[in-house]
Image (cartoon, rainbow, N blue to C red):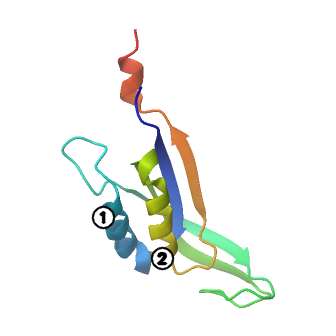
């Protein structure tokens, strides 16, 4: 049975994107034969209000912040997910990074079914 893979999506300020992708690439094995450091990058706009007790990287407590970000998506194996999340937590400047972890089935597995 094939190993479970995950699609990970994280939103981050552009100035941290290369550092984050380099760091993630160090803790995952390539999933695509002949390629490594495979990421999708989407320009996005995030909005939030920092509440009392928070220490925002960007914005002011109590005020709505709107900021340009990059949404970075990539795939990794199940045995790598904890290292990936620890890496994002270490590199990301936000107190609470926006991270989605979605279990996936590789498209090639459908072609191999009888």
| Residue 53 x/y as whole percent | 78, 88
- Say which label, 2 or 1, has the lower sequence index: 1
Q: Using the image, tell me which numbered label, if any, was put on residue 90.
A: 2
Q: Is residue 33 above or below residue 20?
A: above
| Residue 8 x/y as whole percent | 50, 53
| Residue 89 x/y as whole percent | 52, 72
Query: In the image as oriented, which residue stretches furthest toward the left?
Result: 34
Q: Is residue 65 left or right of residue 39?
A: right
Classify 10 Å Cα crowding around label 1: few (below 14), some (14-19), many (20 and above): few
Quadrant for the C terminus in the image = top left
Q: CA distance from mark 2 to mark 1?
A: 13 Å
Quadrant for the N terminus in the image = top left
Q: Is residue 110 above or below residue 76?
A: above
- The residue located at (73%, 86%) in the rendering is 54
Secondary structure type for disc 1 = helix
Mark 1 lies on residue: 26
Closer-to-camera residue (76/1):
1
- The residue located at (48%, 48%) in the rendering is 7
Closer-to-camera residue (5/66):
5
């Amino acid at each position: 049975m094939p190993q479970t893979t995950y699609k990970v999506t994280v939103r981050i300020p552009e100035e941290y994107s290369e550092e984050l992708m380099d760091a993630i690439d160090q803790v995952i094995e390539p999933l695509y034969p002949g390629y490594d450091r495979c990421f999708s990058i989407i320009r996005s706009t995030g909005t939030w209000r920092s509440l009392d007790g928070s220490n925002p990287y960007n914005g002011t407590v109590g005020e709505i912040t709107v900021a340009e970000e990059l949404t970075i998506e990539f795939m990794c194996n199940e045995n790598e997910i904890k290292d990936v999340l620890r890496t994002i937590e270490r590199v990301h400047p936000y107190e609470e990074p926006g991270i989605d972890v979605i279990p996936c089935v590789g498209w090639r597995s459908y072609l191999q079914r009888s």
